[in-house]
Structure formats: C-alpha cells, structure tokens
Image (spheres, rainbow, N blue to C red):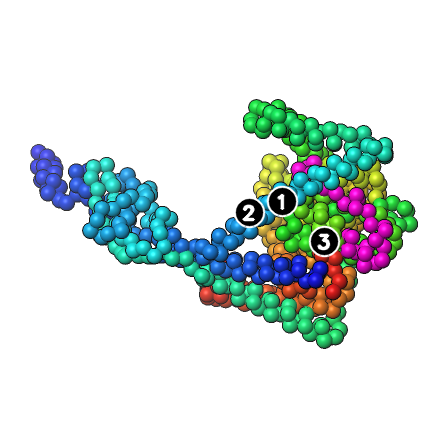
C-alpha cells in the first residue's frame, strides 16, 4: 500500500501529462494550468520546510560549536535578518530589503560567477596538455578556435574565421547532436519506466 | 517646339488614364478572404487570411471587422499593419457564428472587402501538427516495452562497460577507508526534470553502498522539493540494507535557491569537510566548473554525469569520470542489473539504429530532391 499509492499517482499524472501534450482542448489546458498551480503551492510549502531545515541545521552547529560554526552564525543571522527586514520594510524597490539584495546578494553572486574565469583558465591548462592523441586534437581545435575569434587570426590568415565556423558547425555540432539524440531517448525511456512503475528507485525501490 | 507639342499630348493623355495611386480615390479592397477555425488550438480563436490590396504600400493599415449578424453593425476585431495577410481573432466565443470583412484604410478613404462567413470556433481534441511526435513516441515505446518484457523472460543482455559507473563502488570504498564523507550533488534543477530523477535513481544505489560501508553521505540541495525526496530515497536505502541507525537526516539539507549561492555553499563544504568522493549527477548550468574545479583542488575522486551538453567539457576536464548524456539515464539499470531495466537499454539501442536509418534515408532522398520524408519530421 505504501508503494502502491505513489506509483498510482505517478501513473495517472504521467499518462495525463503525456496525453495533454497532444490534446490542445481548453479542458486539457485548464487541468494543466491547475496542476501548475498545485506545483507552486507545493513549492512554497517546501521552501518554508527547507528554510526550517536550514535553520535547525545551523542552530545545532552553533549550539555544539562544531568546526566552522562561525559560518553557520553568519548564515543564520543573514537568513533571519532578511526575513525580519522583508516583513518590516516590504520588498518594494528602494526598501532596505531590496537595497540589501541589490547591493550585497547580487554582487556576491556576480563575484562567484566571475571566479569562473579563473577556473576556466586552470581547467584549460589541464585539458590542453598534449599527452595523448585526443588531447592533442583538443589542443589543436582550441588554438584554432581562439585565434579564429580574434582580429589577430584574420590578420594572420583570412581563412581562420571560416575554419572556426566549420569546427563549430560540423564536427562539434555532429557530436552535440549525437549526445542529444541519446539524451532524448534516455529521457523518454526513464520517463516511461517511472510512469509504468518499472523504475522505483526514486521512492526507495523495492516491490 | 516639336518637343513641347509631344509633351502636351502625353500630359493630356495621361490625365485620362486610370491612376492606381491617386490619393483621391479609395484603395482597392483586399481579396480572396478566407476565414476558418484556428487549427490545433484550445478554441476561442478564428483565423482570417486575405490577399493584400493592390495599393498595399500606400495604405495606413488593415482593420478586421467582426459581425455576429451579417446585416448588423460590425465591431473592430483588430488592426494590422500594411503588408500583413492574416489575423487571429482571439476574442470570440466557441459555437457562435461570426462573419468578417477586411477594411483597407488609406490616408483618404477606405475600401471594404466582401463579407465572409459564417465561421465557428471550437477547441480541438487532437493536435494534428504533433502526429509525427506521436508516431515516434509510439514506435519507441513499443521497442522499449518489447525489450523490457523479453528481458523479463530471462533473455541474457550484453551491456557495455561504463567506467564512470564501475568507479562508483571504488570511490565509495576509498571514502570509507579514508574515513571521509561522500558528497552527492543531485544537480540544481527541479524535481520534474528527468535528469534529476535519474540522479535520484543513482542516489538510491549509492546510498545502499554507503549504508553497507557505514560511510557518511552529504547531500546539499538547491531545490526545496528535491530535498525531501533525497531524504526519503536515502532513508529507504538505509532501511533496505538494515542500517536505519546509520541514517543521518541532518546531512541532507536545503541550502539556497540562488544558483551561485549554492555553488558557493557546496564549494565551502568541499573545502571544509574535504569529502573523499564527489558525485555530481543531474542537471548543471554555469556552476558546473566552479564545483568540479573546487573538488579537484581538494583531491577528491570526482564522478560527474549530466545531459547538459554545454557543461560536459567542464566535467570531462575537471573530473575523473564523466557520464555523458544518456549514460546518466542508463546508470540506474547498469547499477541495479535488473533485467527489466537492462531491457530498456536494449530498446534505446534499437531506437538509435532506427534514427540512424531515418537520417541516412533522409540524406539520400533529399539529395534526390525528394522532400516528403524530411518534411514529415518537421515540428
């Protein structure tokens, strides 16, 4: 019974969502929109639940003075602080909440994103060491791509831009499409197995 | 003198010629008006098409007039710019008769087309434009089900080695020996993403191993709905292995919905907790390289798997093993060795053969300038 209920729900909704793709009728659309609303409601409650889990976790760390508890204190203070400020000042543009969001949260995220440039350089250094035939091919393609995308490439040889386009549109695109076809088939296969109850690992497996 | 006479004759003659762009006369009306229920829609929509006025370039716009009574007064259903030859009226009721005419509006004056109708809108029960998708899904589903049930009968199936999946046991064993935790990142996508579900399927197998080896598994989540599902999957896995006491609920938690906030938190966990094994399985975006490079810097064994084509190069570069695209979906079947799941892999292989054959036929026919086959696949 514990397994049958979620499997039945999965089967019903899985079949409905599949049929819904082929049925443009208003009734089908209305039910679909209703399901999306349910999803938003579930998401909202799960967000509250997730936040409570986060608070509990960090409270325990602070109480037990575990290693790195100072980070937990910053997290907890920021989380509770933003909730309190949000309720007190509102979330309109110009409010303290939005100012904190725009001038603290956004720059912090931008910083993390910009670190990507350094990681890309270190990853490229590792990838481009020509130790094998594959790595040498990768290195060659990368050099052509980098040179072909800057004015210096055109200055050295006018055919570089065309060569980079060819690499992108022929061998690279062929590999991408091959992967995407496999992914598409894998997605349908996994979805079908879940709908039919063959794949049950997501609910813990078992009979 | 002779030139002046010729000019006067031509000028006089031209004054009597019908002049199409004379601003004083109304423009010619749009012709060939067709009105029909908009196909493959939810209803409450009518489509009108026409051939533009001969003086289209001198017009201001076209106005579409809707009538419920052919002899009554029409109301404006909308206006479209010159050069346009179709309009979709979305302000109609299903099951009501409507009539339409198109008015070509010029700077001075206008002209009306003939009135056409009646037309009724209604919602369709089947989207005919998706017939090719339906046929494809049916053929593929048939192949999958055939191989799943033939595998059920005990037919032996060969599955090639997937190094990344074979390495999972080794990676968990290494973490156990080192007394360090295992970090499992189920991607940053939502629960309805099939890549996330595939990741959870792998998590179930991984959690069984960690339960057996008494290892610690840490799962930070970006999606609050994925988090309780992860908890349930791990709890069930520990229960199934007879180790409910070893299950640590607090190690599976929600972090933040912010993409880079999450990347920052997971990077922090990697640096502080120093997990011996990092598993990045699911859907990833720009944070993939931040996670993989931070993990590589801590010296952990890293196994990644994603169907995000743009992130694969980053994982291949920074991780020890990478499950590429469909290998992520094959992982659950590969790890469980259940015949029914393995059967689906065989079905996928046959579908690839069918697709490959279709591509070859398409190339051949298109080369011969026969396009009906390739047109069939247009969505």
Distance from disc 2 to disc 1, alpha carbons, whole Å, reads 10 Å
Chain where mark 1 sits = A
Marker disc for residue A43: 1
Q: Residue B87 in the image: x percent, y percent?
A: 35, 49
> Disc 2 or 1, which lies upstream in sequence?
2
Decide if residue B95 is on the left or right side of residue B329.
left
Q: Residue A43 in the image: x percent, y percent?
A: 62, 44
Task: Say which residue appears at 68% left-offset and 51% top-offset.
Answer: B196
Decide if residue B48 is on the left or right side of residue B111.
right
Q: Residue furthest front?
A: A1
From which residue to which does the magenta span run?
B234-263
Q: Is residue B357 visible in this depiction of the protein?
A: no
Question: Tag 1's secondary structure?
Answer: helix
Q: Residue B280 in the image: x percent, y percent?
A: 74, 48
The front one of B107 and B335 is B335
Task: Say which residue appears at 10% left-offset and 35% top-offset.
Answer: B4
Asked if the residue under mark 2 is in contact with the one under mark 3, i.e. CB atoms within 8 Å, the reply is no
The quarter holding residue A206 reads bottom right
Task: Say which residue appears at 60% left-offset and 66% top-offset.
Answer: B140
Distance from disc 3 to disc 2, alpha carbons, whole Å, reads 25 Å
Give the main secondary structure, helix, strand or loop, of the magenta stretch. Answer: helix
Of tags 1 and 3, the one toward the viewer is: 1
Task: Look at mark 2 in the image and give the residue it sits on.
Answer: A37
The front one of B167 and B115 is B115
Of tags 3 and 2, the one toward the viewer is: 2
Q: State whether discs 3 and 2 lie on one chain.
A: no
Decide if residue B195 is on the left or right side of residue A133.
left
Task: Look at mark 3 in the image and give the residue it sits on.
Answer: B200
């Amino acid at each position: 019974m514990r397994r049958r209920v979620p499997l039945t729900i999965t089967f019903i909704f899985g079949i409905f969502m599949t049929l819904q793709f082929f049925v443009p009728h208003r009734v089908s659309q209305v039910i679909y929109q209703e399901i999306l609303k349910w999803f938003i409601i579930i998401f909202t409650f799960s967000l509250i639940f997730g936040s409570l889990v986060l608070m509990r976790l960090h409270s325990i760390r602070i109480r037990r003075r575990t290693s790195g508890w100072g980070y937990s204190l910053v997290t907890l203070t920021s989380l509770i602080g933003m909730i309190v400020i949000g309720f007190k000042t509102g979330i309109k543009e110009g409010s303290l909440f939005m100012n904190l969001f725009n001038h603290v949260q956004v720059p912090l995220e931008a910083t993390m994103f910009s670190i990507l440039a350094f990681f890309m350089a270190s990853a490229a250094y590792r990838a481009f060491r020509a130790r094998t035939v594959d790595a040498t091919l990768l290195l060659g393609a990368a050099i052509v791509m980098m040179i072909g995308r800057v004015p210096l490439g055109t200055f050295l040889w006018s055919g570089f831009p065309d060569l980079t386009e060819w690499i992108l549109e022929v061998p690279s695109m062929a590999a991408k499409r091959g992967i995407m076809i496999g992914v598409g088939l894998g997605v349908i296969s996994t979805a079908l197995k879940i709908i039919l109850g063959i794949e049950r690992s997501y609910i813990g497996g078992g009979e | 003198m002779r030139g002046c006479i010729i000019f006067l004759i031509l000028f006089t003659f031209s004054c009597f010629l019908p002049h199409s762009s004379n601003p004083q006369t109304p423009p010619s009306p749009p012709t060939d008006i067709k009105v029909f229920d908009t196909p493959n829609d939810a209803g409450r929509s009518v489509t009108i098409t026409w051939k533009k006025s001969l003086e289209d370039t001198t017009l201001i716009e076209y106005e579409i007039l809707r009538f419920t009574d052919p002899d009554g007064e029409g109301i404006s259903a909308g206006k479209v710019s010159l050069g346009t030859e179709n309009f979709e009226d979305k302000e109609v009721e299903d099951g009501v008769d409507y009539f339409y005419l198109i008015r070509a509006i010029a700077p001075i004056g206008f002209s009306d087309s003939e009135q056409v109708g009646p037309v009724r809108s209604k919602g369709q029960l089947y989207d005919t434009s998706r017939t090719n998708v339906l046929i494809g899904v049916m053929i593929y589903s048939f192949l999958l089900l055939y191989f799943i049930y033939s595998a059920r009968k005990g037919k032996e199936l060969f599955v090639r080695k997937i190094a990344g999946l074979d390495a999972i046991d080794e990676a968990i064993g290494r973490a156990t020996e080192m007394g360090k935790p295992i970090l499992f990142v189920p991607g940053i996508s939502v629960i309805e993403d099939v890549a996330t579900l595939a990741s959870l399927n792998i998590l179930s197998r991984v959690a069984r191993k960690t339960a057996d080896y008494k290892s610690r598994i840490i799962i930070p989540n970006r999606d609050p709905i994925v988090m309780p599902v992860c908890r349930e999957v791990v709890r069930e896995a520990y229960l199934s292995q007879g180790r409910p006491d070893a299950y640590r609920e607090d190690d599976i938690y929600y972090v933040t919905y912010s993409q880079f906030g999450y990347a920052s938190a997971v990077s922090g966990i990697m640096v502080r907790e120093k997990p011996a094994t990092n598993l990045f399985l699911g859907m990833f975006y720009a944070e993939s390289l931040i996670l993989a490079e931070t993990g590589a810097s801590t010296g952990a064994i890293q196994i990644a798997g994603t169907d995000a084509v743009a992130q694969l190069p980053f994982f291949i570069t920074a991780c020890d093993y990478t499950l590429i695209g469909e290998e992520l979906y094959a992982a659950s079947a590969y790890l469980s060795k259940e015949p029914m799941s393995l059967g689906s892999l065989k079905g996928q292989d046959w579908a690839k053969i069918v697709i490959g054959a279709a591509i070859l036929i398409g190339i051949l026919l298109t080369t011969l300038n026969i396009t009906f086959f390739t047109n069939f696949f247009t969505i």
